Image (tube, rainbow, N blue to C red):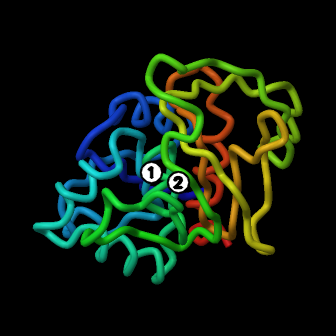
Amino acid sequence: MSTPRIGVLALQGAVAEHARALQAAGAEVSTVRRPTELQGLDGLIVPGGESTTMARLAAPVHLMEAIRERHAEGMAMFGTCAGMILMADQILDAEALTGFERIGGLDVVVRRNGYGSQLDSFTGALPVSGLPEDDLSPLQAVFIRAPVIESVGSAVEVIASWQDRPVAVRQGRVLAASFHPELTPDHRLHQHFVQLAGARLNS
């Protein structure tokens, strides 16, 4: 079985934590700061952080456009927290991102910081479905200034919810979460993403 190559967008956020989780899940990992570093990747994680800062840092080298192009060619994507915002097709409060390219490709409507400020951060145990080996034990999730998913398109599958709102979703070769899965020892979402990214290699 071939080992998938997965990049972590390294403009901001918990890059090292995502890299460790991916390595534990069996992936070959690299960091991405410019379009040329996307070449040869089977998947890309867009981590949490500040979505406006990430968009501003990516703009000079047209990185968001390059990610979009590579995804169209088959590269899988996993967006967490701010990463999910940048991948969402619609943002209800996108004023701060006006004039900057985003990635898109995920048919959801989100609202930034919908779960409150930094002081409102919390950890919750989430019921899950459809993860590797059908492990249905609750997923510990860390929410930090997390975006709310207001609605999902018909092609989007909900993997986990919190208080009746979806917080982890999948659409084809796109995975997204409102929370920070890299900050807990439960790497099931990363394992699932490694499977999604490696599907072409092993078909």
The residue lying at 30 percent from left, 68 percent from top is 98
Residue 174's x, y, as percent?
60, 63
Which residue: 47% across, 57% down? 93
- Say what amino acid the circle numbered 2 marks: Phe
| Residue 3 visible, this angle | no
Foreground mark, 2 or 1, reads 1
Q: Residue at the spot x=54%, y=58% of the render? A: 2
Tell me which numbered mark, 2 or 1, is placed earlier along the sequence.
2
Question: In the rendering, at what x and y percent does residue 112 appear?
Answer: 49, 47
Which of these two is toward me, 34 or 108?
Answer: 108
Q: Is residue 36 above or below residue 46?
A: below
Amino acid at pointer 1: Gly
Q: Which residue is mark 1?
A: 83
Q: Is residue 143 visible?
A: yes
In the displayed structure, 157 sits above or below 137; it is below
Question: Mark 1 and mark 2 in contact (Cβ < 8 Å)?
Answer: yes
Instruction: Please name the residue shown 19% across and 57% down the image.
Output: 56
Residue beneath label 2, please?
78
